[in-house]
Structures are given as C-alpha cells and as structure tokens.
Image (tube, rainbow, N blue to C red):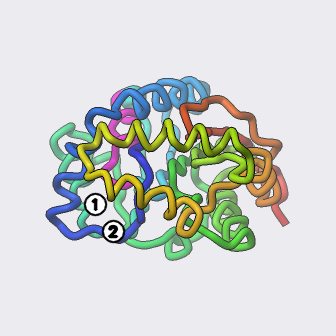
Amino acid sequence: MTPPRRPVAFDRSQAATYDEKYVRLAALRDALHLLLSAVFADLPAEARILCVGAGTGHELIYLARKFPRWSFTVVEPSGPMLDVCRHKAQECGITPRCAFHEGYLHSLPISTEFDGATSLLVSQFILSPEARVAFFRAIAERLRPAGLLASADLASDITTPAYQSLLSVWLRLMRETDSQLEQIERLREAYTRDVAVLPADQVSAIIASAGFTEPILFHQAGLIHAWYAERRSSIA
C-alpha cells in the first residue's frame, strides 16, 4: 500500500522514484500491512492471494515474507509500476510464487481459486457507484466462497466541517512527500473531482452489495479506511 495514485499515469522515471517520494509516509503503510497480516493469518498455509492494483508491490512483498508458502497473482494496469514490482519480487526471491498480470481486473480470467484478495487505495478512483460495485463483484467472482477481501480507500463525508478539518491535516501530512505547495493544494480539488471520497458507510455498502458479507472496519489512519469481508456463497 502506498498513498493515493492514478493507476496508469506513470512513465518509467516516475515509477522508479515513486517509493522514494513516499518513504516518509511508510508508517501509514506499515500499520495497515501489520493489521492486514492479522486479518489473513488463518488463511490456508498454501493460500493463493490476488493483489489488485498492486502498484510497486508493497503488500505483495510484505505478505510473501510473512507467509512463505503463499502464492500471488498481481494485477496492475501500469506497465512501469509492474516492472518495479517484478524487480522487487526478484530481489526478494519470491518470483517463483508470483504471477504478474498487466491490465485491469476484468482482463484476468475468472476462476474461484483465490483464498484472499487485496485492493488497497484502488476503488476510490472509480467515480461511478455502479462501476465500483462491478469492480468489487469482479473480485468476488475470483474468490472461493468465504474467501477474504481486504480493501482500503479514502473515505469521509465531504459535506461535513469535520472532513474539511481532517483534509487540512491530511494535506499537511502530504508535505512529507516534498511536493510543492501548489501540488499539494491541487489535491484538495482532486479529491472532489477525481477521487470518489464517500462516507465510510457508503463504501461498506458498495462492498457488501458486490457479493460480500457486511464489511468490518479494521483500520483507520487519517482519511484511509480499511475493511475486510468474506465472499458470500452466492454472489448472483
């Protein structure tokens, strides 16, 4: 998991420096990954995990080290980001346990073979609620019954004064990325135009309507909220 990004808007130089840009925010990522490993801890010893929109592969590397018998299918539409992910996997010696799929989730063949799936800061870029439901349904279609989804996105009720206050805190946090002030301020507008920041209960309802049990909120850090849910036996 890394801070919010557009899935394919990266050239090779941007992808190569992406992790370095957000290194000072690593504590956000590490806390989520620690709790994620606890959510997934009771999956089978040789579980198969689907990582959707994995970017440069932080959750892949963390889970692969934590659970050395697991295998992973990594889905990422940005070729340069996926190249960085592949390189990391090779350096860590986990490539034999990984399959890399460049493209969006809908282009990955459907088979209910996965025991767990991650979608970390991905669905928030799907602006249409119907398309967002379809995204989570596509994950459900690839999980075995009772398979676990862990999903994280920015969430808040943007109509409230509390959101405006928290957003200001969040943007001050983004100064740690060494971005220029005008770049950080542009995020304020982007979060109303390019990111579907919805109240947490609405995000939870979207996930549930896609074939999952009622999602359980297991982590919050600033605007980031993370849920887990089981795939229902029937998702029709």
Which residues are drawn in magenta? 55-65
Q: Please provide percent x and percent y for residue 170.
A: 48, 40
Front-most of residues 103 and 99 = 103
Q: Is residue 47 above or below residue 210?
A: above
Amino acid at dot 2: Ser
Calculate the distance from the C-alpha at mark 1 to the C-alpha at mark 2: 5 Å
At a point 46% along the width and 31% down the height, the residue shown is 33
Front-most of residues 72 and 82 = 82
Residue marked by disc 2: 78
Label drawn at residue 141: none
Location of the C terminus by quadrant is: bottom right
The answer to if 228 sits in the magenta stretch is no
The answer to if 60 sits in the magenta stretch is yes
Q: Please provide percent x and percent y for residue 143.
A: 64, 53
Label drawn at residue 81: 1
Count residues near mark 1 (Cα–Cα under 10 Å), then give few for <14, some for 14-19, many for 20+: many
Left or right: 186 as drawn, with respect to 39: left
At a point 76% along the width and 48% down the height, the residue shown is 204
Left or right: 178 as drawn, with respect to 107: left
Q: Is residue 99 above or below residue 138?
A: above
Left or right: 114 as drawn, with respect to 16: right
Dominant secondary structure (helix, strand or loop) of the stretch shown in magenta: helix
Looking at the image, can residue 115 be seen?
Answer: no
At a point 41% along the width and 55% down the height, the residue shown is 185
